[in-house]
Image (cartoon, grey):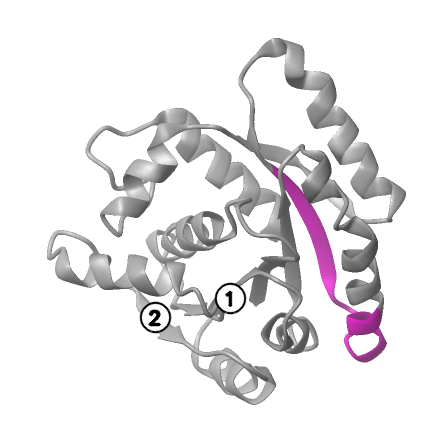
Amino acid sequence: MLLVVGGEKGGSGKSTISQNLAVFLARAGYDVLLLDADPQGTTRDWAAERQMNEGLAGLTFEHATGDLRKILADRVKRYQMVVVDAGGADSLALRSAMAVATHVLLPLRPKRRDLKTLPNLDLMIAQAKTVNPDLVVRAVITQCPTLPSQVKRILDAKEACRSFEIEPLDAITMQRNAYDDADEGGESVFEIAASDTKAIEEVEAIAKELWS
């Protein structure tokens, strides 16, 4: 399977989700490639930190930008799972990856500036499906505030996705220090010393819905 994690706006946790899902899959026994297609190189920097930590399990990583179709067509023959961090921009890398992916995951915060990208995401998805009609597209609401009073905002964000026929996952991620703590050391939430079971459960729930 080839999962592309992307969107039109940065800051919603695309790299974090890509990294944690790749580690989750590797820990589950899959042969995984994590590919950073974002020119900012957030996941590339994370992978560099990871390589310097001898206590962490190895994870195959590449960095590539531009038209990814040939690269990905080759990599899906070599690996059971390919996870692409396509970054937060409408780019050639994102569009070309969507053209050959099996799954696309669109992280969105429950904020107006993120949800305003839905019309263009809808257009990108429609264009991708003209050449990749079996593409499975899901949204995930991320970095949700923990206050009970904010539940309506989360539900409204999911409904906004549905209004563009982009089905949101039941799973969400909350604002948790564990994600930042893990990122700083090239780790995942499964590996940090001060394990956060809630963060682990969130990543597992995302994976279960994507690949169940």
State the residue lying farthest toward the top: 149
Q: Quadrant of residue 195?
A: top left
| Vertical comparison of 53 with 203: above or below | below
- Please indicate, yes or no, whether residue 160 appears anywhere in the rendered image: yes
Instruction: Identify the secondary structure beneath mark 2.
Output: strand
* Spot occupied by residue 152 in the image (x, y as percentages of width and height): 74, 18
> Which residue is drawn at the image coordinates 44% and 75% (left, top)?
79
Q: Mark 2 points at which residue?
A: 61
Q: Does the magenta stretch include residue 128?
A: yes
The residue stretch that appears in magenta = 127-141
Name the residue nearer the viewer: 52 or 211.
Answer: 52
Mark before the other along the chain sequence, 1 or 2: 2
> Which residue is drawn at the image coordinates 38% and 68% (left, top)?
31
Instruction: Identify the secondary structure beneath mark 1.
Output: strand
> Which residue is drawn at the image coordinates 63% and 77% (left, top)?
92
Name the residue nearer the viewer: 166 or 57.
Answer: 166
Q: Quick check: 50 left or right of 16?
A: left
Q: Quick check: 195 left or right of 164?
A: left
Q: Name the residue under label 1.
A: 84
The N terminus lies in which quarter of the figure? bottom right
> What's the distance in space between the residues labelled 1 and 2, CA to CA?
10 Å
| Mark 1 crowd level (few <14, some 14–19, many ≥20, 10 Å Cα) | many
Q: In which quarter of the image is residue 112?
A: top right
* Spot occupied by residue 60 in the image (x, y as percentages of width and height): 32, 70
> Which residue is drawn at the image coordinates 73% and 60% (left, top)?
136
Name the residue nearer the viewer: 12 or 200.
Answer: 12
Three-letter code, disc 2:
Phe
Q: Does the magenta stretch include residue 207?
A: no
| Vertical comparison of 210 with 190: above or below | below
State the residue lying farthest toward the left: 54
Name the residue nearer the viewer: 59 or 185.
Answer: 185
Three-letter code, disc 1:
Val
